[in-house]
Image (tube, coloured by chain):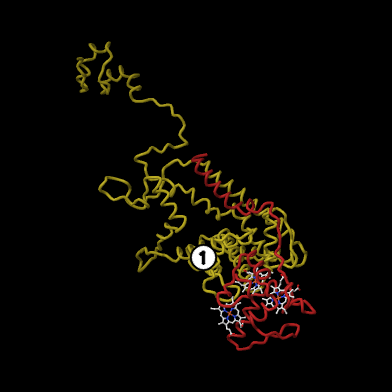
Amino acid sequence: MGALFSFVVVILLILVAYVGVAAAGLQSIFGIVIPYVAVLTFIVGVVYRVIKWGRSPVPFPIATTGGQQKSLPWIKQAKLDNPSSTTGVIGRMVLEVLLFRSLFRNTKSELRDGKLGYGSAKWLWVAAIAFHWSFWIVLLRHIRLFATPVPSFVNVLENLDGFLQIGVPRLFLTGVILLLAVTYLLLRRFYVPQVRYISLASDYFPLFLIMAIASTGILMRYFFRVDIVGVKELTMGLVSFNPVIPAGVGTIFYIHVFLVSTLFIYFPFSKLMHMGGVFLSPTRNLANNSRMVRHANPWNYPVKVHTYDEYEEEFREKMINAGIPIESTVLPEEFEEEFKEKVEDAGTPVREEE
Amino acid sequence: MYNGGKILFGILIFLALVTFPFYNDIGKANVRPEPKINTPEIQKLSEKQCVESQAFMKANHMTLLNEWRDSAVRGGNRTYVASDGKKYTISLQNTCLRCHSNKKEFCDTCHSYAGVNPYCWDCHIAPKGAKK
């Protein structure tokens, strides 16, 4: 249901852009207005969400402890999985963000002959890492359309990405890997019953959307080519705030841009915010040093307390009368004589005055 | 905000990265490269026409080159019949670059603008004076 809905929405988006540009000639809406709105929504939305997260308190140190914590000097600490210092946390975060270390430990549970078994499951990690890294490289490669002169690292990326020199224009591997990986991530939701059960439209929509973005990009590069110089004129117009619509750029380009704009607009409102969220996960970004540093709960308000000492001070007389043992070793002078005996009976040592 | 310093620092990095294209290019004139076609060979033409229409060449010259290469190297066919019926000898160096002998002012202006560097010239010889 969620899958069908998301699929239909993405198809509708494609149709909207197609009709809007090919039939209604609204190039300036799809090529200028919507991209500006999208980038603005993206930037403001992401910053807003992150600040909102920053304002929510973290009441407890809840770092996940994936190994031996810092202990006695002769017990080896798992410095990355159970960091106790900022350096350790940085190391853990870097590995988490760049290599998805915790996903690498993904396990699969299975009933075998009525017994529950767990096994390592790396496919999700493989697809996720392939997906994210190729998406990142594809994104970086697009800088060639947004900077003049093109920074040299973009040329280096292009040469690496196209090193197989298949066809002209050269086949970029990341484009293909991105599409394959996102397809795997989608099929996983279709075919793994447990995952299918918990999948919602908000899971399927980004997958279909990214699939459509990658497909239109690949179609545009290898099949329905557009004039890239014209495209760059448009994109440079956008970033230099002198927007222009060059003549003769094919409709597929506007479809691609419309889908990307949709992704940018959708981003801050969706699970895609895990891009910012991963940095703000208390389970990863806190050091497990709760035995060395007191983690003050920011919710704590000043509590009016009545300590035992104060309590005893208040009721000492009554307690002694009732024969209740008291802690205080020093009796107020006026009781000294009167109660000495009782106190001794009650078994509480009375310190001799020196 | 809790841990405000660190979070604001992260936000600043994010903003610096996403707005890079804007502050990098703001105010720069947006000039489309104008590939020059004033070569002697083209001056001689009565009708200044490329192999195919200009619009097609702009977007598709690389796929055309791919077709040419396959047709010559794999199919052994070294004649290309254009859509207007004219015949061309299939050759990168001797057809394309005979007309476009100003590789630097022609092919390369576009390519450096768009950030592409075709590796063809690792083997094929560019016209003299137009060393890449």
Instruction: Give the image location of residue B127, x and y in percent.
Output: 63, 75
In the visual, does A182 lie left or right of A123?
right
Q: Amino acid at mark 1?
A: Leu
Q: Is residue A145 above or below residue A48?
A: below
The structure residue drawn at horizontal position 29% and vertical position 50%, both measured from the top left corner, is A76
Image height check: is A140 above or below B128? above
- In the image, is A337 to the left or to the right of A25? left
Q: Position of residue A202 (x, y in %)?
A: 57, 58
**Residue A231 image offset from top left, x and y in percent:** 68, 64
Classify mark 1: residues with Cα within 10 Å, few (<14), some (14-19) or many (20+).
Answer: some
Quarter of the picture holding the C terminus of chain A: top left
Question: What is the tally of numbered marks visible in this picture?
Answer: 1
Which residue does the image show at 56% across and 77% down from the upper left?
A: B123
Quadrant for the N terminus of chain A in the image: bottom right
Q: Which chain is yellow?
A: A
Image quadrant where residue B25 sits: bottom right
- Looking at the rendered structure, the secondary structure element under dot 1 is helix
* Residue for badge 1: A185
User: Where's residue B125, x and y in %?
Assistant: 59, 77
Label 1 marks a residue whose chain is A
- Is B66 located above or below residue A271 in the figure? below
Q: Residue at point 74% right, 63% down?
A: A246
In this image, A237 relative to B5: left or right? Answer: right
Relative height, residue A34 to residue A22 (above, below): above
Residue at the far front in the pictured view = B129
Splitting the image into 4 quarters, where does residue B50 fall?
bottom right
Chain that appears red: B
